[in-house]
Image (cartoon, grey):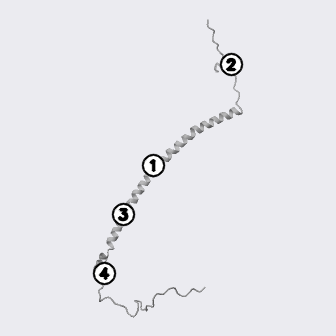
């Protein structure tokens, strides 16, 4: 015949039936045990939270860099357009400031003509256009009074 199994009775109907060695109230942990638990929780938090925060930071930086890359591409297109229009304007300036064009416009609109040999006047005797005489190159002048 088999031995009857033990059944433990709870003191109140709301409490679970536990063996006597588990029914004793737990003593609050103090000292080293409590510090060990706290250390374990801290390590667990570091092992879980730090990688999660790094991952979220990586996702954020990837999103920001994507936005900056699109902005950079738009600015590059704008810069290329500005360079192209600058080149077109330089070509137009070269066309408009050509010597033949300027001379023909001066003849037509202003009534000017090319200077001939009869129109040129040679100044002699070292006289300049302003009526002064050419005394050679002048350097410096009187020293300043201190």
Q: Crowdedness of circle 1 by 10 Å Cα count: few (<14), some, many (20+)?
A: few
> Quadrant of the image for the N terminus?
top right
Residue 68 vertical placement versus 90 (above, below): above
Measured Cα–Cα span from mark 1 to mark 3: 29 Å
Compute the Cα span from label 3 to label 2.
Answer: 94 Å
**Are the residues flagged by discs 3 and 4 in contact, CB closer than 8 Å?**
no
Identify the residue under disc 4: 110
Query: In the visual, does 136 lie left or right of 143?
Result: left
Q: Is residue 32 left or right of residue 106?
A: right
Provide the secondary structure element on which disc 1 rests.
helix
Image coordinates of residue 125 in percent, x first then y, are: 39, 94
Give the Cα distance between marks 3 and 4. Answer: 32 Å
Look at 57% across and 37% down and name the residue there.
48
Q: Position of residue 140 (x, y in %)?
A: 51, 85
Residue 66: mark in rendering: 1
Residue that extends furthest to the bottom in the rendered view of this protein: 125
Query: In this rendering, which labeled residue sits more in front, label 4 or label 1?
Result: 1
Apparent side of residue 19 relative to residue 65 in the rendered image (left or right): right
Element on which disc 2 rests: helix
Q: Of callouts 1 and 2, which one flags the residue occurring earlier in the amino acid sequence?
A: 2
How far apart marks 4 and 1 lie (CA) works out to 60 Å
Position above or below: 116 against 67: below
Q: Please, what secondary structure does the residue beneath circle 3 have? A: helix
Q: Which residue is mark 3?
A: 85
The crowd level at tag 2 (other Cα within 10 Å; few <14, some 14-19, many 20+) is: few
**Above or below 81: residue 6:** above
Front disc: 3 or 4: 3
Locate residue 40: give its quadrant: top right
Q: Which residue is mark 2?
A: 20
């Amino acid at each position: 015949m088999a031995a009857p199994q033990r059944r433990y009775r709870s003191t109140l109907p709301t409490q679970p039936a536990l063996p006597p060695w588990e029914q004793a109230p737990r003593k609050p942990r103090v000292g080293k045990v409590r510090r060990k638990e706290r250390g374990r929780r801290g390590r667990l938090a570091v092992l879980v939270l730090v990688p999660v925060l790094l991952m979220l930071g990586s996702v954020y930086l990837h999103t920001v860099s994507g936005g900056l890359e699109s902005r950079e591409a738009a600015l590059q297109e704008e810069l290329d357009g500005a360079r192209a229009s600058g080149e077109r304007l330089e070509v137009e300036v070269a066309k408009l400031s050509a010597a033949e064009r300027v001379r023909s416009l001066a003849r037509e609109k202003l009534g000017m003509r090319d200077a001939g040999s009869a129109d040129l006047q040679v100044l002699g005797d070292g006289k300049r256009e302003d009526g002064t005489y050419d005394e050679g190159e002048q350097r410096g002048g009187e020293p300043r009074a201190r």
